[in-house]
Amino acid sequence: MKAYELLYFVDPTCNEETRAGVMKRIEVALGDGTVDTVEDWGKRKLAFEVDDLTEGDYTLINFHADPTVIAELDRVLRINDAVKRHMVVRRPDKD
């Protein structure tokens, strides 16, 4: 399994139940992968407006998974309306 980092943000007005649902969906999409750390960065100002938002509630997740899982994770995050933007990066320094 390879090491990855996922950074995503949701609308800061979302309730805690919605945020927990996003996290649960990510865990399901990872399958046999393991979540190493989850860091809640909180509200941050965006560099430019996204869907009329000037702030986002950020979460950083470090995890290990097979490379084949990343496409499914990307698909799941794209169709989730709560997630405004996301980015998955390979971390060769953490393998």
Image (tube, rainbow, N blue to C red):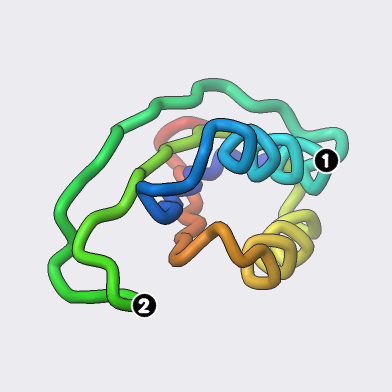
Dot 2 alpha-carbon crowd within 10 angstroms: few under 14, some 14 to 19, many 20 or more? few
Indicate whether 40 appears above or below 71: above
Where residue 79 sits, quadrant-wise, is bottom right
The residue located at (80%, 48%) in the rendering is 29
Sequence-wise first label, 1 or 2: 1
* Mark 1, secondary structure of its residue: helix
Rendering coords of residue 90 (x, y %) = 50, 52
Front in this rendered view, residue 32 or 55 = 55
Q: Which label was assigned to residue 51?
A: 2
* Mark 2, secondary structure of its residue: loop
Taking the image as shown, residue 13 lies to the left or right of residue 18, namely left
- Quarter holding the C terminus is top right
Front in this rendered view, residue 23 or 2 = 23
Q: Amino acid at mark 1?
A: Val
Asked whether the residues under the numbered discs 1 and 2 touch, taking CB atoms below 8 Å apart as contact, a structural biologist would say no
The residue located at (77%, 43%) in the rendering is 30
Rendering coords of residue 2 (x, y %) = 64, 41
The residue located at (20%, 64%) in the rendering is 54
Instruction: Mark 1 vs mark 2: give the one in front.
Output: 2
Q: Amino acid at mark 2?
A: Asp
Distance from Cα at disc 1 to Cα at disc 2: 27 Å
The residue located at (50%, 22%) in the rendering is 37
- What residue did someone put label 1 on? 28
Where residue 48 sits, quadrant-wise, is bottom left
